[in-house]
Image: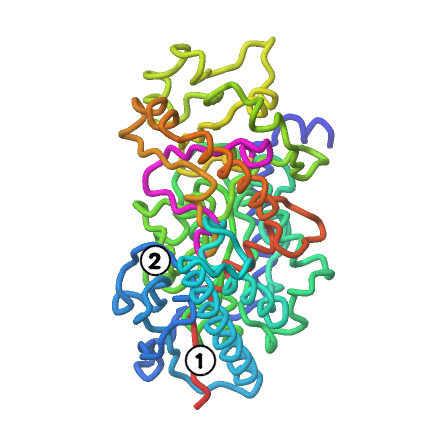
Amino acid sequence: MADLTCTTPFVLYPLLVIILFFYSLNHRNGFLSSVVDDDPSCHLSVSSPESVLSSFRLFSLRSSSSSCLTTLNNSSSSEVTVVEEVDEAAERIEEGLAMARAAIKKAGEVDLRHRRDRRNGSDSGFASNGSIYLNDFAFHQSHREMEKRFKIWTYREGEAPLFHKGPLNDIYAIEGHFMDEIENGKSPFAAASPEEATVFYIPVGIVNIIRFVYRPYISYSRDRLQNIVKDYISLVSDRYPYWNRSRGADHFFLSCHDWAPDVSAVDPELYKHFIRALCNANASEGFTPMRDVSIPEIKIKFGKLGLTHNGEPPQKRKLLAFFAGGSHGEVRKVLFKHWKGKDKQVLVHEYLPKNMNYTKLMDQAKFCLCPSGWEVASPRIVESLYSGCVPVIIADSYVLPFSDVLNWKTFSVHIPVSKIPEIKKILEAISEEEYLEMQRRVLEVRKHFVVNRPSKAYDMLHMIMHSIWLRRLNVRIPLS
C-alpha cells in the first residue's frame, strides 16, 4: 500500500473525492431537481416601509426595484417581502426581527440628535467627532439585538473535507474559523433547529473543494466548483422548504478564496438573492454591497490567532510610508514602477533584504501601503491595524469590510490607482494633528479585526455575523 500511495496520488485523490462527494449525497432525493419554485404565486415583491438599514450610512447603490434587497443608505428604500404562507415559528422570528428594526431605527435617530447637538456645541459626550462608526447608537443597538435574536442553522448534508471543514491557518483561514465557530456546538448563535433560524448556512468548503477536486491542476475552469455548490443547494432546497420560501435571500456561504465569487456566475438567477460573504469584494465584478458581505482577508500563522501590538508611538514613527510584497497584479506593478527603491521616506520593496524586518518596519511607519494583489483585498490592511499603522488602501472598486457600520475615512487613507505617482504628495499633505487622530482611531478600531476563539463581542467573527445579520434584517416574510 505504501508503494501504491507514493506512486499514484494524482489518480487516487480525484477518485476518492468524487466517491466521497456522491456517497454523502446519494441517499437524498431530487439531487438535480429545480431549486427555485416556478409557481407564479410565489414571488418577491417590494414593500413600502422604510428600511431599518437606512440607519447605517453606506454607498450609493442600485435602486430597490432592480433587486430583492434594499438600498442600505437610502431613507426611502424598501425591504424585501416574500409572499408565501409561513408557519408559527417563522411568524415568531419575523415578529422579533420587526422589534429589532424598530429598536435600531430609534437608536439611529438618537445618534442623529447627538450629532446635531455636537454641531451646536452641546456635546453629549457619547462619541467624539470623527467617530470610527457611521452611526454609533444604531450599531451598538443592532449588535445587542443580534446577540438576542440571531440564529444560524447549518445544513447537515455533506461530509468533510468538501463540506463542514475549512483551513484554520494561512491566507484563507477565516473560512475555516467561521465554519468551526458555528459548527463546534458551543456558539450561542448556532440554531438548535432550522425552525428557530434567522439565516441558513451553506457549509461548502471552497478551499478544500479546490484543493482536492482540482488535484492535479490540469484545468482552472470553475465548472466543477460551481456544480458542487449548485448541486448542494438543489439537494437542500428539494428536501427542505427554507430556500424556496425566500429564494435564498436568508441563505449564505462564506469564503476568502479568489474563486469564491465565481460560484454564482453559473446561474445568476439562482443566486440573485443569495448572500455571499467574500474577501474578494470587487464591485466591478458583481459584488453587490446591499446583498453581499465583505469580510477581511487575514493571514493566520500556524498555532496563532491575530495579535495586536502598538509598535512605535506615533511621535517616533519617522518613516512616512512602507510596503513590501510580491509583484502580484497590475496595481503592484504600477506601484513598483513609481516607488520601488526610489525614495527613503516612501520605502517600497518587492522582497525585503535579509537584514530588514517586515513587522518592525510596519511598526516604524506612519502609513502602510495596502495595494491590491491579484484581487482587490489584501491582508496588509489587517496587518497595518495590528501594528498601529494607518492603512493606505490602493484599490479601485473595493468594498471595504464592515463598511455598513465603520467610517473608514476616519482611520485610513484611500488612494485611487491612478494617483499612485502622487502617494508622497498626498500623505505629506496630511497634517500632524490629522495623522495623530487617525492613528488613535486605528488603535480603537482594530478590536473589530481580531479573531478570538471562542468569538467575543465586537471581534472579527462577531462583525462578520453582524454584517450577515444586517442583510437578514432587510428581508421580511409577511405574517399573513
Q: Nearer the viewer, residue 267 or 177?
A: 177
**Above or below 196: residue 161:** above
Q: How many marks?
A: 2
Residue in view at x 38 percent, y 78 percent: 81
Residue in view at x 47 percent, y 41 percent: 411
| Element type at mark 1 | loop
Of the numbered discs 1 and 2, the one sitting upstream in the chain is: 2
Q: Nearer the viewer, residue 283 or 86?
A: 283
Asked if residue 310 is among those painted magenta in the image, a careful observer would answer: no
Locate residue 75 relative to residue 102 in the image: left or right.
left
Location of residue 105 in the rendering, given as x and y in whole percent from the top left corner: 46, 72
* Quadrant position of residue 444: top right
| Element type at mark 2 | loop
Asked if residue 394 is among those painted magenta in the image, a careful observer would answer: yes
Which amino acid type is shown beneath numbered disc 1?
Ile
**Above or below 362: residue 99:** below
Location of residue 379 in the rendering, given as x and y in whole percent from the top left corner: 52, 35
Locate residue 313 relative to residue 227 in the image: left or right.
right
State the quadrant of the C terminus: bottom left
> Quick check: can you spot residue 33?
no
Span shown in magenta: 383-404
* Residue at numbered disc 1: 477
Which amino acid type is shown beneath numbered disc 2?
Asp
Q: Nearer the viewer, residue 165 or 361?
A: 361
Q: Which mark is residue 344?
A: none
Locate residue 200 relative to residue 286 in the image: left or right.
right
CA neighbours of label 1 inside 10 A, class few (<14), some (14 to 19), many (20+): many
CA neighbours of label 2 inside 10 A, class few (<14), some (14 to 19), many (20+): few
Locate residue 441 relative to residue 83 in the image: left or right.
right
Residue in view at x 41 percent, y 35 percent: 393
* Residue at numbered disc 2: 267
Of circles 1 and 2, the one toward us is 1
